[in-house]
Image (tube, helix red, strand yellow):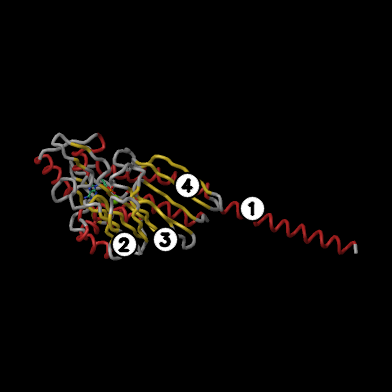
Amino acid sequence: MRKKKIAAVAAVCAAVAVLAAVIIADSLSSRTHRIDFSAMNTVVSLDIEGFRSQSAVTRISETVSRLDLVMLSRTAHGSEIYKLNSSDKPVVLSEQLTEYLATLKQLEKDSGGAFCISLGALSDLWDLGNGGYLPSQSEIDSALETKDGFSVNGNTASVADGAAVDFGSVGKGIACDSAKKILADAGCKRAIVAVGGSVLLWSKGEESFKIGIRNPLGSANEYAAVLETGDCCVSTSGNYERVFTAQDGKRYHHIFDPSTGYPARSGLQSVTVICESGLMSDALSTACFVLGYEKSLPLLEKYGASAVFITDGNEFITSPSFDGKLTVTDSRFSGGAVK
Ligand code: AMP
Ligand code: MG
């Protein structure tokens, strides 16, 4: 009898221990960590849920900051891009940068030159980071000549005097890709990593996410539509970033048409590109903004991407490949195929 009693108590204790383990595991897996910090000249927001989310937050924030300082920044003296732009001799690139540049040079060709990784001198001329400057035609012509002053051959690249490589159109997407690698190893459950206009939506299962598409008629935290999609990278390029009104009364923005040297006017206020790779979603959003709706479609198809366009006429248009759900939330806008 006494033996039976001891066995019963032991069974209850074991059950309580198992229950406690389940409760502890659950509380770990539902733990969420959020931080905002500055890197790549923008705000980076991490929202990570699940086991080891705290260490994933720490590793991602360190990695994104390092990526900028060690590789992509145009102004940090130790970065690879800074050294490349300031060298008067050919430079041997890291394996990673060689890979990025091969991909981006291919995109330059595929986009018919709408995307250009060596527009740094033109961006500097317009000086949009410091309030803006309306250049003369001859200044624009000279800056445009420099875009051909960059060449890359395998892992060796040269930048001619006056020319500059500029990763401003792709760095944020690259940061999303590096976050994705960390999340895959970390054991987290779900994450949203926003690096300026590029956002990584990541989950261990097949989760669904809802994010806002910035309202071109509103301020930075207002949205005009809600996009519902599964795991992917989403990048938006819009004519509301880095804008200035010049003495001629016109507004100028930061995405340049390499065929004119002026801010692109392709009938769009913004393009949001959705695909697996952060690098590609970011590069394509810039390219598609320059190309406009019609000319973007073959490019999106080639890269297995889809897009949501907002036209100058406040209309939402999705590419035929778009298979998410889009709900327009501002009545000033029309369209937006709801699937
Ligand atoms: P995003 O906001 O991703 O479209 O990137 C815009 C940034 O990319 C600008 O601030 C410039 O630094 C750079 N940029 C501007 N025009 C182009 C272009 N046609 N191709 C590649 N980079 C560009
Ligand atoms: Mg971009």
x and y, in percent, of residue 204 in the image: 49, 60
Type of amino acid under label 3: Gly
Type of amino acid under label 4: Arg
- Residue linked to disc 1: 24
Circles 3, 2 touching at the beta carbon (< 8 Å): no
Q: Secondary structure at mark 1?
A: helix
Q: Is mark 2 within 8 Å of ligand 2?
A: no
- Residue linked to disc 3: 230
Q: Nearer the viewer, residue 326 or 15?
A: 326
The numbered mark at residue 244 is none
* Furthest-right residue in this view: 1
Front tag of 4 and 2: 2
* Residue 95 at least partly seen: no
- Residue linked to disc 2: 337
x and y, in percent, of residue 252 in the image: 19, 41
Type of amino acid under label 1: Ile
Q: CA distance from mark 4 to mark 2?
A: 38 Å
Label 2 crowd bin: few (<14), some (14–19), many (20+), radius 10 Å: some
